[in-house]
Each structure stands twice: as C-alpha cells, then as structure tokens.
Image (cartoon, rainbow, N blue to C red):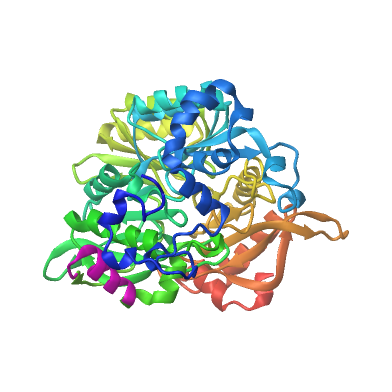
Amino acid sequence: MATDPTQDDASARRPAATRKVTRHRGEGQWGMGHFTPLNGNEQFKRDDDGLNVRTRIETIYSKLGFDSIDPNDLRGRMRWWGLYTQRKAGIDGGKTAILEPHELEDEYFMLRVRIDGGRLTTAQLRAIGEVSETYARGTADITDRQNIQLHWIRIEDVPAIWQKLEAVGLSTTEACGDCPRVIIGSPVAGIAQDEIIDGTPAVDEIHRRYIGNQEFSNLPRKFKTAVSGSPVQDVVHEINDIAFVGVVHPEHGPGFDLWVGGGLSTNPRLAERLGAWVPLDEVADVWAGVVGIFRDYGYRRLRTRARLKFLMADWGPEKFRQVLEDEYLKYKLVDGPAPAEPSTRWRDHVGVHPQNDGRFYVGFAPKVGRVDGAQLAKIADVAAAHGSDRLRTTVEQKMIVLDVEADQVDALVAALEALDFQVKPSPFRRGTIACTGIEFCKLAIVETKGRAQHLIAELEQRLPEFDQPISINLNGCPNACARIQTGDIGLKGQLVLNSQGQQVEGYQVHLGGSLGFTAGFGRKVRGLKVTADELPDYVERVLRRFDEQRAEGERFAEWALRADEGALA
C-alpha cells in the first residue's frame, strides 16, 4: 500500500468524512484532509512503507553490508522489523544530545523479538537462546513489554536470524516503528484460578488480522496495546494507547473495560475509560476502530505530539467514543462497569501458584531482565525436564513456567534457583526494573542495568528484613522506557554535580508513583537528585524512613505522597 491515503485502496475503507481534502496543514491529520508530509519521518513513510524494507535487507543490505544501507531505511524503516542501530561504545552521556545520529550509532543493531502476550514454548525460548549465542555475543534482555532484545547484531546475519526465529513461530514484525507494537497480555491468561476472562483469543485475532498489514503500518507514532482478564491487572493498562481490562457486566457477563490514551515519556498521561464494555468477540473490531482513529486523526506535524494521548487530551473520552462508534464501528458500544482494585499488591506472578487445572505455575526473577543466550537455553531445558512446554515473560521483566505438576514443583524451583533465578526473591530483586541504558541505547545519558543490579545487591545486604512491596525503576534518559513516573522510586538518568562540583552520572528522583491501585505519577521534590555513587545510600535512607513512619497496611506510594520533604531527601 502506498502511504498516501488519497491514492490507495485503503482510502475506500475509510469513512467518507475522513477523505475530504482541505488546504490547511493543521496538525497533519489525514482525517482532516492534511496529507502533505510535515516532517522527515512522515516523508519517508510516504515514500515507502516500512514493511517493504525487509526485501532490501534480504537482497541488498545483508549482502553488501552496513555501508550500503539507505539512511531512511537505517534510521527509519528498519524499525518496522525490530532493528535499531545501537550506541557506539565509549561515547559518554554528555554527548547524547550533541552528536548527530551517525556519530552516535555503531555498525551493529539491537534486534527486538516480538512476543505477543509474553507466550513462549520451550522450542521458541531455546531458538532465541541459540540466536543470542550465535549472532548476538550472548546478549539477551527481557523487556518490560514482554519482548526479548538482542544486541551486537550484524546486518549480514539478519536473514539467517529471521529464518531461525520464524521456523519456531516467532518474528520481529512491527516490533518497533510507527505501527502496532507487541500486544502485551496477562502472562497467566487461560490458566489462572481467579481469571475473569481469557483474552488470548483476542490477542491472536488482532495479530492474525492486522500485524504486518499495511492498513495500519503507517501510524503517526508507535501504538501500544494491552489485553488482560486478570483481576490483578498485570499489564499496566493505564499507560497504554489502548487497553482491554477484564470486568464482569451485571447483565452480559465477563468482558473488557475499554481504556484509551495512556503513555509516559516526557509528557506522561494516564489512559481514560470510555465507559464501554466490550465482549471478547468484538475486541479485535474495537481495537481496529481505535487504531483507525489514531491513523486518521492523530497528529502528524510534530513527533513530540504524535502519540494518541495528545488527541485524547484534546477530544476527551466522550467525543472519542462517539467518533469510534459513529465513524468506525457503525454501532453503539454497551455501557459497562469500571474494574475493581487489584486483588494483590504484587502483580508480577512471581512464586508458586495453582492453575485452574490442578497444576501449578512458577514465576521467577532474573535481575532487571538481564539474562544471556546460554541461560535462556538452560531455562528451556529446565522447564522441559520438569514437564512443561510453555513459558511466559511479564511486564516486570520476569518469567513464568506454566503447567507444572505438583510433584515437580520443588525440583523445578531448586533447578531455577541453581541458575540464580529466584522464585522467592527479595523485594528489591522482585521490584526493580531498568531500561537498556547507555551500554547500547543512543538516547541514554547514564548506565542502568549494571547499576540496578548493584543497587539490588546493596539493598539486600543492608536491609535484609525489609519485606514491603517496592518498585524501583531506573531509566537512562527522560523517555521513561522503565516507567519512572509510575514506580515507588523512579530514577531518571541525567548528569548531575557531585560534592566536588564535577559533572557525573546521576538521577532525578520521582517518589510515589503507582499503577493498579490509585494510579498516579510520582512526586518530584525540588532539587532532589542523587549521583550514581550515592544511590544505594539514598534509597536505603528513604526506605528506612518509610519503614519507621508507615501506617499499618500503608503502601510506599501512599507514604511518599504524604511525607514531608525532609523525610524524602
């Protein structure tokens, strides 16, 4: 499909009102007739659909090497196939915002494997491990969107990697780019004893119909989806572009509450309910309607305002629902109830839990999602040896083994812990997540993964009796890939001055963010920044004060929002 909607068959699928052409540039909304590209990203998407770059990768770039790659493919369209150039080693964070893209990037790629719903078989996990060992120097990170990312990928190896992944039913299709990214889903969908409704069929239907389909491969920016029928609300639905949250309608039974317009980055916004109940067999249609609105009415003039949250902020949920019903669905949605508060303060499924079929699932905690290819293969082997063929990743950078017979649970737990994957981790290992950081990311200013692992070790040693749920989110830049605004302790990487007046790596501190209960963004105390070296001391100090001052049953987020500034310093 050509990306100009006035010249392709896709325009015939859109309501007539969205095809009216005007002379005003406006915000670059196709639905208002504003089709002229208003920035370089919109231009390269119009020139050629991102999905088409695969052919050039296979037939040209993988054969002629890195220097043969067209710049608009290298820094644009290749994202549609999960490929980003990684940061060149040795460039410090002070140069992140100064250097040009070609000066920051190495001749290697990050490759993101798309894992919808976090669902993996042992064969698939083993294949990712083999790709990591063969082509990615053993690297592998479990992300907070249930994907697995590899590094040090050469363009010459990409076709072989695709062949290896696709042979077991995996892909990198639209893992990045201005398109529908991975669909995150409850990692215990279909097996949890307390599940309201299994969203797996909806995830599969959305993927079957629309992923890799040029109908939605040119959106204003990325589009993030969450589907979960779990009462523990395990997919951070409040910060996705669209989310379907399990609820029970008093007349129609189990279905989903529809949320739209969430997102973080430098302008965070919580999603809003449209007040609509969606049955399972209509989820894919409603999803397509919301994505259609984003495609046609989303703002394409400025990249900084191109996310769906900005349109929702301007329209509001009432207008958004009306346009969805009148122009896209052509029917009225059923009014429905809001979801109840989560049933537990930990929503990561770590530990041993009964399934609805008499077997058990076992959730375990890598440190901030950092694993390696050999470990992934060992996890697959351990799962298989204990009778399981299914695993899941979670949005907390954790993993789960499903379908474990009762007499195999203890042996599986022992085998995982022998690999240093704890089933009963400390609150610090359990609750800490981190983005990629300056090691590989061109946007990063500071290091994250190693520093988070060091912080966990320090806190475990210093606070061995601490037993409260705590989320510590480390991010290497302001873009919030590690959800800094919604963690109990959110740490935004930046350069700060130490006591000697030297510029060093450090973090701006956000305190008291929360999702799932009373959702809200963390509190920023004026001037509260810590150097990387001071970080363990600072976190220890704040957690001790919380332990001393908290009321019975009070969560850290609640305490942090009421505490005086002196207690937070």
Residue 528 image position (x, y, % from top left): 70, 68
Q: In this view, does 515 lie above or below 481?
A: below
Residue 420 image position (x, y, % from top left): 51, 34
Image quadrant in which the C terminus is located: bottom right
Front in this rendered view, residue 340 or 151: 151
Residue 432 visible in image: no
Residue 381 image position (x, y, % from top left): 39, 24
Q: Is residue 68 left or right of residue 350?
A: right
Q: Which residue is drawn at 64% across and 50% down?
A: 443
Q: Does the magenta stretch include residue 295?
A: no
Image quadrant in which the N terminus is located: top left
Segment tinted magenta in the rendering: 319-332
Q: Which residue is drawn at 71% across and 47% down?
A: 100
Q: Is residue 375 above or below residue 71?
A: above
Residue 341 visible in image: yes
The residue at the far right in this view is 500
Q: Residue at x 24, y 50 (%)?
A: 202
Front in this rendered view, residue 417 or 180: 180
